[in-house]
Amino acid sequence: MFRHSLRAVARTAASARPIAATRAFASSASGPTFNWEDPLGAKHLYTEEELAISETAERYCQERMLPRVLQAYRDEHYDPKILEEMGELGLLGANIEGYGCAGVSSIANGLITRAVERVDSGYRSGMSVQSSLVMGGINEFGSQEQKERFLPEMAKGKLLGAFGLTEPNHGSDPGSMECVARPHPTKTGYFSLSGAKTWITNSPIADVLLVWAKLQETGKIRGFLVERKDCPPGTLETPAIKDKNGLRASITGMIQLDDCPVPVANMFPDIEGLRGPFGCLNNARYGIAFGVMGALEDCLDRARTYSLERKQFKGNPLARYQLIQKKLADAATDIAYGTLAAVQVGRLKDEGKATPEMISMIKRQNCDAALKNARILQEIFGGNAVSDEYGIGRHVANLFVTQTYEGQSDIHSLILGRAITGVQAFV
Ligand SMILES: Cc1cc2nc3c(=O)[nH]c(=O)nc-3n(C[C@H](O)[C@H](O)[C@H](O)COP(=O)(O)OP(=O)(O)OC[C@H]3O[C@@H](n4cnc5c(N)ncnc54)[C@H](O)[C@@H]3O)c2cc1C
């Protein structure tokens, strides 16, 4: 199965799927049946192609990724081959048209992130940075030459990307960034970039780093594609940040630039100010909103299984107790609502009708709900929750990060508050 054929594979799988399977929730002789794994029937809203792409992604993630994640998390090790495997399947930059990308809908792309995050938010983070933040940024804001130079190899997962916005002193407030681009003092046709970025997913392994810096002559933020292979020694360092509490199956680091020469041709040509990074973040935040539902689905699945098998008091399974059932019901409800909201915004996005505030709303709501429910479901495992073998603690630690990055939830509240009142509460 190759990346160019993601849609073809999806179409074949869709046409081969028996009607009974595609209508798993349709009426039976005794009427429709409730499916706790899709309580509000979101599947009915997907096209045949979206369903087939979801199946392809789920199969890869469960068969190839899941067996690796426990050890990767323990060792805090990210295997870059994962991105190459995803590239083979056409999962990278999947909603970009052309350049070797599959050109699927936003919902299909969301279903891919959900499948990956069902395994681990760290794996989804590595993919989102590659697909949405860097490839998406190049596709939206890059010159034709930049698109042709970078996108095809990035779609294959052979060229890896990182997105550098956050700085040690400026996280939620990127407009105050200190990273600067000046005309290079000795190299004509080059900028000289200086500054530091921190908490950057993929930075230690990235070949191309999309760095946001202020152009000295205008004071405006611009995007620069820094190619590691072209950086003279000592001008670019990307040390890893080790001993993380969460997202340990992903790799995170800094970007340190010291008079790093970057060709003028590697600057995004037109986009200026925060519209650049926020445009990239918009796509990635949509993926997160869909993705975290996958992590919570895995928590629910694990907690339900555990509650049916674990017996306490007169040999009763935990699942028999009302307090346990409430925890499961709350999680299933938030998954169902969160998924439907992501589907609605995805459709509007493809019709050009989605606003950044809609994406703030689902990113905030779904991340908060995933973290809250995962923490509550963790209680069902009692002491066993502390063992990493049960998987739930890993999701809880990861989901703290998803609530924090790409706009911490409270920052999204302020974005929504501004849209509701017209009053800016950031400063
Ligand atoms: C594992 C990991 C991977 C990451 N990957 C990337 C990446 O690839 N690229 C990248 O650029 N960044 C990345 N980040 C950085 C992430 O986006 C930032 O951590 C996030 O934006 C928050 O910034 P901060 O950590 O500086 O927190 P701060 O901005 O210092 O905020 C701390 C707290 O204060 C609150 N706060 C801040 N300002 C206000 C205000 N005005 N009103 C009310 N409350 C406020 C925040 O909501 C938060 O709760 C990553 C982070 C992590 C942990």
Image (tube, rainbow, N blue to C red):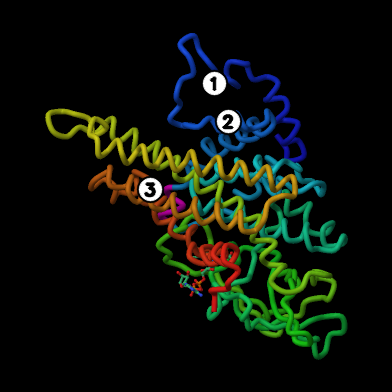
- Residue 316, located in which quarter of the rendered image? top left
The amino acid type of the residue labelled 2 equals: Lys
| Residue 376, image x, y percentages | 32, 48
- Residue pointed to by mark 2: 43
Q: Are marks 1 and 2 in contact (CB under 8 Å)?
A: yes
- Residue 210, located in which quarter of the rendered image? bottom right
- Residue drawn at x 53%, y 67% as measured from the top left: 414
- Residue pointed to by mark 3: 373
Mark 1–mark 2 Cα distance, whole angstroms, equals 9 Å
Compared to residue 199, the image places residue 283 above or below, namely above
- Of pointers 1 and 3, the one earlier in the residue sequence: 1
Q: Nearer the viewer, residue 215 or 44?
A: 44
The amino acid type of the residue labelled 3 equals: Asn
Q: Classify residue 195 as left or right of residue 289.
A: right
Mark 3–mark 2 Cα distance, whole angstroms, equals 22 Å
- Of pointers 1 and 2, the one earlier in the residue sequence: 1
* Residue sitting at the far top: 29
- Mark 3, secondary structure of its residue: helix
- Residue 257, located in which quarter of the rendered image? bottom right
- Residue drawn at x 72%, y 67% as measured from the top left: 276
- Which quadrant is the C terminus positioned in? bottom right
| Residue 185, image x, y percentages | 80, 90
